Amino acid sequence: MAATRPGPDGPTTPHIVIIGTGFGGLGMAMQLKRAGIESFTMLEKAGSIGGTWRDNTYPGAACDVQSHLYSYSFEPKSDWTRKFGLQPEIRSYMESCATKYGLHAHIRFNQEVASAEFDKTSGLWVIQTAGGEAIHARVLISAVGQLNQPMYPKIKGLDRFRGEAFHSARWNHDADLTGKSVAVIGTGASAIQFVPQIVPKVKELKLFQRSGAWVIPKADRPFTGFEQWLFETVPMTDRLYRGLIYWKNEVRALGFTRFGGLLEAWAWLSRRSLRRQVRDPAKREKLTPKYKIGCKRLLISNDWFPAMDQDHVDIVTDGIDHVDESAIVTSDGQRHEVDAIIYGTGFQATEFLTPMKITGLDGVDLNTAWKDGAEAYKGMSVSGFPNLFILYGPNTNLAHSSIIFMLEAQVRYVMQCIRMLLDPGLAFMNVKMSEQRKYGEQMQAQLKRSVWVAGCNSWYVNETGKVTNNWPGFTFSFRLMTGKLDLQDYELQPATGSSR
């Protein structure tokens, strides 16, 4: 595959490979199209687009960010059916964007990336697919996100279980749970959605949890026909509504990143909902969180507590010792006979870019570079890995607003880098280690003031206690920070024979 090709205005355009077709990958590709750059290829490990919204098809799958904000600012959708979009509608929106921009012609499906290695001599990334094909690219963009590799619990005997067993992100729709005894391990954002959907079907549900979760009501409802008509015929109302949502959400950042006491209002609301919706005092005690609100992901739901209140739902807080052919055995020796086990245990969120093997300058492996925890300059560039840009990378996740807003800021920054690489006299750009280290230290210093280091175990923090996922501020401050590329932050390597 050619590394470069003529651009629309004559100069050499770098061939770009984007890994992943979720919101990050699609957003990147759409902006390349808008800029008139056609020389890009998208590699997708699955047979269709959508990323996490393709993979998570469990009952009740929905977004916890309002629909009008959880969409591209440059591609508004006026006919959202609900304030918080459901998985099928979000997936449909992504498909419509891909079709409108003609992205399917650039996508190679069922092409999982096994590895990528940077060739300093040619200034190209050599990408190996799982099928053994080698693809060359001048620019490599990872858009695999943070929530793409399911986390399975490490429990003895899971392979011995003879019933149905699956992760919520790999939901087995052929499994009929009607009238069955079902175990759910985990009480994260996915379980909070699918458990209320299956409770009416099952004979018995056993929820195995380490701690209760902070759950607050979800201000969700269908949009009326008049509202949809107004959003479509008077676009200003759509933009105004989005803006109101944005600024309302933005204020919440203060509670997570600076003034944790502000979150106590939500704690009160959660406790009140629990008291009103769960009758059994013993259940209420088990469902009461034992950690500071906001330390783990704050969950929103209107049907979680009512589902827990059902007589055929049992909350098990004893640790799991092992699993045998037909039961989960807890540390107190009790056997919990079940027909099916569903893992609601989340994702390997701190293991960025896994399971791909990424090798940069001088043969350095990215996992080695990140042995103490992932970090990237402005969340996108890693020293020693030239012309590699990561979307939804380290310290770009949010607890208060839309990741799509963050992705758009990242895409704008990467587009500036790509425009630099249009220059045939430039072989590659490599962020300086001094800048990356300084940026990383600033991130961790700010994060020490956040609620995420309040002492709980969460997917925001790695095994060494480093917060690798979250952004410690407002989203508009991230957008301002990434608004202009500063070439002094990078080492610029001239192309061979160039006088640059």
Image: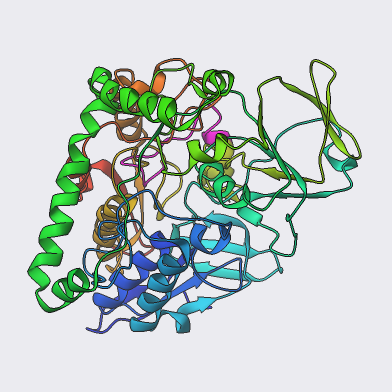
**Residues drawn in magenta:** 368-382
The coloring applied to the image is: rainbow
What percent of the width, then of the height, locates residue 15?
42, 72
Q: Nearer the viewer, residue 246 or 461?
A: 246
Predominant secondary structure, magenta span: loop
Instruction: Report the residue at 38% width, 48% height from top.
Output: 64
Residue in the image at 63% along x and 72% along y: 110
What residue is at 61 percent from the left and 68 percent from the top?
46
Q: Is residue 484 visible?
A: no
Q: Is residue 375 magenta?
A: yes
Residue 316: quarter of image:
top right
Q: Is residue 82 left or right of residue 140?
A: left
The residue at 53%/45% (across/down) is: 190
Q: In the rendered image, which quarter contains the C terminus?
A: bottom left
Q: Is residue 101 above or below residue 456?
A: below
Whether 96 is drawn above or below 163: the answer is below
